[in-house]
Image (cartoon, rainbow, N blue to C red):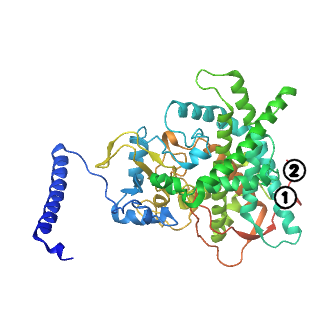
Amino acid sequence: MAWLDSPVIELGFSLIFLWIIYRFVTKNKSKSDKGELGLPPGPRPWPLVGNLYLLGSLPHKALAKLATKYGPIMFLRLGSVPTVVVSSPAMAKEFLKTHDLIFANRPPTSAGKYMAYGNRDVAQAPYGEYWRQIRKLCTIELLSAKRTESFRWVREEEVSAMVRSVREETQHGMRFVNLRKHICSVLLNTVCRMFAGRSYSEHQLSRGQEFSQMVAEMMHLAGVIVPGDFVPSLAFLDLGGYCRRMQAISKVFDEFAEKLIDEHIQRRRTKKSEEPDIVDVMLDMAEIGSAEIQVSRVHIKAIIMDMLIAGVETSTTTIEWAMTELLRNPQAMSKAQQEIELKVGKDRIVRESDLANLDYLRCVVKETLRLHAPAPLLMAHESTQGCNVGGYHIPPKTRLFVNVWAIGRDERVWEDPLEFKPERFTDSSIDVNGHHFELLSFGTGRRGCPGIYMGLSSVYLVLAQLIHCFHWNVEGDLDREEMFGLTLPKKFPISAFPSWRLTIDDPPKC
């Protein structure tokens, strides 16, 4: 290797090095002369994978730790994707309110491509006229307060059935029950009855799958990190096999959704439903037609998918974490039970009309959402053009994550942030409707969750029944381990022993 010692080679390396330094200095000088702002601070990326290696199995925690070093606005390269992560209420407000229009877009994902009919659903559709019309359809016709109220009897029936199911398990000699199973089941049945008029928990689908198995697979795949979404050159490898699984489960779901629509059309030919479900409403709109959007079977299927995934997963996660924290904090559990006894009594179960009077219960839900945001990084936003935020330049097509998990545990925002204290919301004006950037559990602005009222109605009612109807005992300490995905569920389900605490023998059949 003596040739490396040649003066000519040394001169060549020196010239290359000086050229690199010259280009770096002149490039930065040019930017400075033009008054251009630089990118936010962040860790140095690796070739090809960028900063993906830093995320680990719990990205929200890894990003919160990085924010302590780089600040509340941080720049990363996830593969080849420029990404900004914000971790403070002030920065969240800048991006999601001041610059809401610029960051109203959604980045393309494999889940949107393969499971959401080419991003035709509300959650993942790119910002534009199509998204505006499909969101208007949902907020005004399908998920409005009036529509939510019309399904009150469905929620009450299903929650009452859940209470009976839990009690029957204990009466048949089962000491402990799997709370997650019961919570997920009642929410799945409720959502199905709202959009389809009946539950499908035991309905056998084609390909030998059960309905609940299909939904579980869809919820899991909706939250996985697909390497090809961040490193497009590797997309053809389908690392992890996620795209293949998405295509397979989307075929199962599509067959189910097609059959469901056909059943509704056939039924409507014979008689008009006295209590129309959401598919009936959409079919009415398809028949009437509209100059704004012509509702098609694809629209109906995409909205059903959104309701199944978002309506079940986020609420299940929130209720299970609320029960975990109440069981870990007996004083809070006792206070919640006493409030319900005072307002409802022990001679009946809670009705939805009672919920408006249960102030402490609402504080419990807010505190749960603060500590355990169901979507810890919200859904990703994407900038449609370059802009300046917080003294930095944000390029176009930059992906944005808002670490609401970190904001909810920031000691500069919350006193004793790691403690479960529902009382902090007593007489507080902070709500979860997107008006307060300290508590952005459902997002805000143009891309805020349109189903927030329908989702919270189920959360309040299920939680109220669980703590009002039963005493709950657990053995040992309850863990707080998390599992990252579409939402942030407990890694291990609650296994608890319930005992009946009301004076009536059995919950009535609504």
Q: Which of 344 and 474 is in front in this view?
A: 474
Q: What residue type is labelled 2?
A: Lys
Instruction: Please name the residue that numbered disc 2 is placed on.
Output: 509
> Disc 1 residue type?
Arg
Q: Judge whether 292 appears above or below 413 on screen.
A: above
Please say if 4 is above or below 162.
below
Residue sitting at 34 percent across and 41 percent down? Answer: 386
- Please determine whether, in this image, residue 418 is positioned above or below residue 201: below
Q: Which of 23 and 337 is in front in this view?
A: 23
- Determine whether the residue tagged by mark 2 lies in a helix, strand or loop: loop
Residue depicted at 17% across the width and 53% down the height: 23
Q: In which quarter of the image is residue 120?
A: top right
The x, y position of residue 13, in whole percent, is: 16, 65
For residue 76, side relative to residue 476 (left or right): left
Left or right: residue 297 compared with residue 265: left
SS under mark 1: helix
Q: Which of 227 and 151 is in front in this view?
A: 227
Q: Which of the numbered marks, if any, corresponds to residue 4?
A: none
Q: In which quarter of the image is residue 198?
A: top right
Q: In this view, does 188 lie to the left or right of 109?
A: right
Q: Are marks 2 and 1 in contact (CB under 8 Å)?
A: yes
Residue assigned mark 1? 164
Q: Which of marks 2 and 1 is nearer the N terminus?
A: 1
Residue nearest the viewer, comparing 10 with 433: 10
